[in-house]
Image: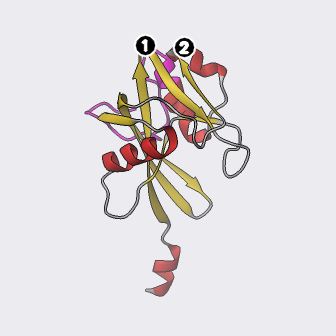
Amino acid sequence: MMDEMMDQKIVTQVTAAIIRQDDKILICQRDNTGSCPMLWEFPGGKQEEGESLEECLVRECQEELGVTIQVDEVFAESRYTYGDNEMCFTFFESRIIEGELERMVHRNIRWLRAEELGLYTFCPVDVEVVERLGSDHIINTENNFNSVHGVNF
């Protein structure tokens, strides 16, 4: 019993926002410390105890960007493993409903057209989302994405 408990991975829920405005998508560059230094990502973060995924994403965008967002439908879900920690990422379509963007924790923030996303180097978990955003067709991601709205990615 104890061995089974020790073999179980910790699953951390992480949210990310695909924030769209005027046909552009917001991306953020991580600083030069921690995981994925200097790489680009979609804003978001880890779910805290007692909050929903949507509440987590609203909080993270307020903390990181100084804006309030409307969280809409799920765009994609993905799992990624860092050592013994398994991360379950949920990417939500989102839009800013209040506030002006501030760069509070990121090195840079940029608005890009979907076809420009491929010009930037993203954290590994974001790469397939970037590819999907930049393409007009659904890509085969070798089952890294779960089914969302009845469509298998």
Label for residue 115? 2
Q: Look at the numbered discs 1 and 2 and tell me whether their residues touch, using CB distance below 8 Å.
A: no
Q: Position of residue 137 (x, y in %)?
A: 43, 17
Quarter location, residue 76? top left
Name the N-terminal-most of marks 1 and 2.
1
Instruction: Identify residue type, mark 1.
Output: Asp
- Its colouring scheme is secondary structure
The residue that disc 1 covers is 23
The residue mark sitting in front, 1 or 2, is 1
Let me know if residue 74 appears in the view. no
In this rendering, the count of numbered labels is 2
Q: Closest to the observer: 97 or 1?
A: 97
How far apart, in angstroms, are the residues tagged by discs 1 and 2?
Answer: 11 Å
Residue found 56% across the figure and 54% down from its top: 81
The stretch drawn in magenta includes residue 127: no
Dominant secondary structure (helix, strand or loop) of the stretch shown in magenta: loop
Give the magenta range.
131-153
Quarter location, residue 74? top left
Residue found 26% across the figure and 33% down from its top: 149
Instruction: Identify residue type, mark 2.
Output: Glu
Q: Image quadrant for the C terminus?
A: top left
**SS type, badge 2:** helix
Q: Position of residue 109 (x, y in %)?
A: 59, 29
Residue found 39% across the figure and 44% down from its top: 57
Q: Position of residue 32 (x, y in %)?
A: 73, 44
The residue furthest bottom is 2
Residue found 51% across the figure and 43% down from its top: 64
The stretch drawn in magenta includes residue 138: yes
